[in-house]
Image (cartoon, rainbow, N blue to C red):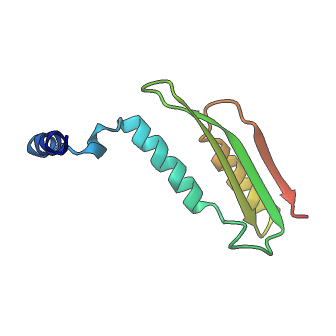
Amino acid sequence: MKYGKRLVAGALAVCGLSVAALVTPVQATTLSEIAAIRKATPSCNANPGAPWVGRVSGSVENDIDDRIIPVSFVGCFQSQPECERWKEKTSGFITGPIIQYSCDARK
């Protein structure tokens, strides 16, 4: 079986393809957008004294195969306006129903 896997990997290499190339462009874009939002969201663990908590959740539809990808983002912010700006921008990414959409004072 190892030989078969090597043969397939070799054939992909000869054709100039990789396993990453087999991911559909929309799926790759959707997953990279999710990662970018997570990276840009200030972590509550890294900001334990931040007085505002923002939450946005819902789903994103993959246009290629209509697969629904549930998403949830939580961030902690120094001000309500900062949280509200993040909430607006982040919710614009969601294509399905928005389940959670809030900026609340941290308790």
| Residue drawn at point x = 70 percent, y = 47 percent | 88
- The answer to whether 28 appears left or right of 73 in the picture is left
Residue at the front extreme? 1
Residue 51, x across and y down, in percent? 84, 68
**Tally of numbered tags:** 0
Q: In front here: 21 or 1?
A: 1
Residue 67, x across and y down, in percent? 51, 28
In which quadrant of the rendered image does the C terminus lie?
Answer: bottom right
Residue 53, x across and y down, in percent? 79, 60
Residue 59, x across and y down, in percent? 63, 35
Quarter of the image where one finds residue 3: top left
Residue at the left extreme? 14
| Residue drawn at point x = 79 percent, y = 71 percent | 50
In which quadrant of the rendered image does the N terminus lie?
Answer: top left
As drawn, 60 above or below 31: above
- The answer to whether 65 appears left or right of 103 in the picture is left
| Residue drawn at point x = 54 percent, y = 48 percent | 34
Quarter of the image where one finds residue 64: top left
Q: In front here: 73 or 2?
A: 2
- The answer to whether 7 appears left or right of 64 in the picture is left
Residue at the right extreme? 107
| Residue drawn at point x = 16 percent, y = 39 percent | 4
- The answer to whether 101 appears left or right of 59 in the picture is right
